[in-house]
Image (cartoon, coloured by chain):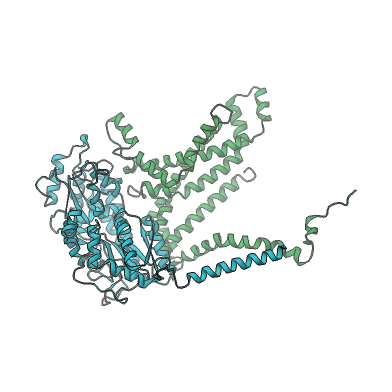
Amino acid sequence: MIRRQFLKKSLGVAAAATAAHSLSSCGGKKDASGRGQITFGSYADPALDILKEVILPEFEKVTGIRTEWVEADFSGWYQKALNDGQTKAGAFDIYVMDDLWVPRFAGAGYLANLDEMGFQTDQDFVPSALDLGYWPPKTGLRQPGIDPKAKSTLYSLPLISDVQLFFYRNDIFRNAAPATWEEVLRMARQKSDPTKRQYGWVTRGVKGNPIVNSFFVLLHDFGGDIFGENWKVVLNSPQAVEALEFYLGLLTYAPPGVAEFDSDQEGATLLQGNAFAATMWTGWCPQTDDPTKSRVVGKINFDVPPKNRNQVAKLGLFMAGIAASAPHRSEALEFLKWFSSPASQLRFARAGGTPFRTSAFKDEEARKKSRWLDAILRALTLGVPSPRTSDWSKVEDILGTELNRALLEKGKAKEHLDAAAAEATAFLKSAGYPVG
Amino acid sequence: MSAPAKPIAETLGLRGGWRGKWLPWALIAPMVLFALALTVLPLCYSLLTSFQEYRLGQPPAFVGLQNYQHLLHDLNFRGSLGTTLIFTIAATGAEFVLGLALALLLKEEFRFQGIIRSSLIVPMVIAPVVVGIIWRLLYNADVGLFSFAVQALTGKSLSVLSSTTLALPALILVDIWEWTPFMFLLLLAGIQSLPQEPFEAARVDGAGAWNIFLHLTLPMLQPVIVVALLIRALDAFTVFDQVFVLTQGGPGTATEVATLMIYKSAFRFSQFGYGASMAIALLVLVMFFSAAVTRAFKGKA
């Protein structure tokens, strides 16, 4: 065979192979059953394990639709999802999101309108969890540029009903969970012993989102808030200052270096038996009963956060939305319908997952498997989410930096909250908010 | 006797005519275009973005120099540039001194030379994020090695990363640990490539080790030193991974370097235009710095 003939034949084979591959991929990814494949994009988090390992295989079995799970770290996935939304690349069918992302993604048109696609909700959905999937928000302030009369539309559904619970040691708080924050402080004062590495309180002190999330509950409980009417920044109100002073008082009984603690160190301190109480995300609940991870198995109970004035819990749900550019929209919708059905939610709860249907929360078998479900349901009803604006991350960073400074200086609560309020106000003004 | 070989260009028919003139350009064009697409285009796009207000879901709006005006008055950005500068000078300086000392110590042949040299470069080949995690454990106030040592000596616990005065030096120490091997390798290669005659002549003339180092080694090594310092300084100026993993810019803003601010503006706060303007400002600063160093040592490096 001469060289030219060889080249011609090789090109022919390559072209045939390419054509065959292209033809086979026409109309999206299909398997032998003829059903499509849906691709989930997500951040890595152990709270999603039951969904991946139990629920998705069942969904594949029942529907014949194959699933692919692509994950990255939290920041990495956020960037990927943002790119996919912006470029309409269609690499993903379902975005797994932090509830904070919903204003950004829905506001920017990166999510499919579930109402238009025919998704039906019902009374069994936990209202505070479901509300986070709407844009514009059903209640509260609306970002500038959004018609105040615009109808709230469903863009995403809860996937994991995550909320901050009050974790406490039942061998320290012997009778029941402390009813008030004062009780938590009193016990910390009485029983903390740093020489034995016993601390009355542990929290996330690192700047930004972690410290803001841990302070959030106290801020709202003491009657404070981030924004008032017309987006006026009120995070330096007398109530907020009082809340921060109380928070700093609690931190007297926290481990050394708490200013650099994120969720991992906070959880480890509690699980090692070195702290009596903390407000933590529900993803930590199963680990408290796991002897390979906890030295205090059976000694940690869960409840809604204590009360001072307005008892609240901080919401932080995992949400799922269909990408506006999803190549398999109908299959993705089928998944959301199937997963949110009473039967699937029950199965999810019985396997150890955190559902978003009230009936699944109340199931006895599920409660036996996960003794924290009752506390989660009660916390969800008290739930307050982060402010619903796509600019919250910036305000959160400003507040988080000043809270971290106050923590390091162990005081000057008013000074730091004033500084945060001034910077946040300047930022919001530049971003077009009326700011009061 | 055979005829003299023709020049290659003549053999290929490349001398004269359109072929000779354009073919070389045509051959390198794909690679040049590819390189331009990967480097110049994103840069141009960033420059364009820096003149825009870029909010998710809305078409970008041209705002002229507004982002740059904002940048001039942004105290946080100025602070982050100062932090970056301190980090760069301290880390690069210490790495140079330690790297040179190690290179001088280990330049001679000795037993276990291979093992020692190999183990010295281990930190450099560990991913920066992993380095960050290792040091986060070492700095842990409760169970970390540093805290343990300080507690054993003084009876008090030490929270390195929570201290506004210690956090930045702690990050510099991590960078020194990771990148001194790089300096060591470059300088060792430079020292070993120096001609030996001047050193032998100096020794014959009775010069001491210190004089040989000061008047021979250092001047002859200057080109390598300049390149090594420049490479490390540029790299340190854009440090991100360790800061991201270890401190997130905290406590307060004690370790907030410029790259972290750029990252947060663009990817956390979705202020792409402002983030791009910061990136361009940083690029201009780095280019000025490189040009100044290159000019100062022109002909030597």
Q: What is the display colour for chain A?
A: cyan
> Is there any visible trace of residue A408 in the rendered image?
no
Q: What is the display colour for chain B?
A: green
Q: Where is residue B157 in the image (x, y as percent from the top left)?
A: 28, 35
Q: In which quarter of the image is residue B7?
A: bottom right
Residue at (45%, 73%) from the top-left corner?
Answer: A27
Q: Where is residue B187 in the image (x, y as percent from the top left)?
A: 57, 37
Q: Nearest the camera: B220 or A3?
A: A3
Q: In which quarter of the image is the C terminus of chain A?
A: bottom left
Q: Nearest the camera: B173 or A378?
A: A378
| Outermost residue to the right | B1
Q: In which quarter of the image is the N terminus of chain A?
A: bottom right
Q: In which quarter of the image is residue A32?
A: bottom left
| Outermost residue to the left | A175
> Is there any visible trace of residue B231 in the rendered image?
yes
Q: Nearest the camera: A235 or A315?
A: A315
**From what the image shows, is residue A71 above or below residue B232?**
below
Horizontal side of A393 relative to B42 (left or right) equals left
| Numbered marks: total | 0
Q: Where is residue A265 in the image (x, y as percent from the top left)?
A: 29, 45
Q: Position of residue A82 (x, y in %)?
A: 40, 64
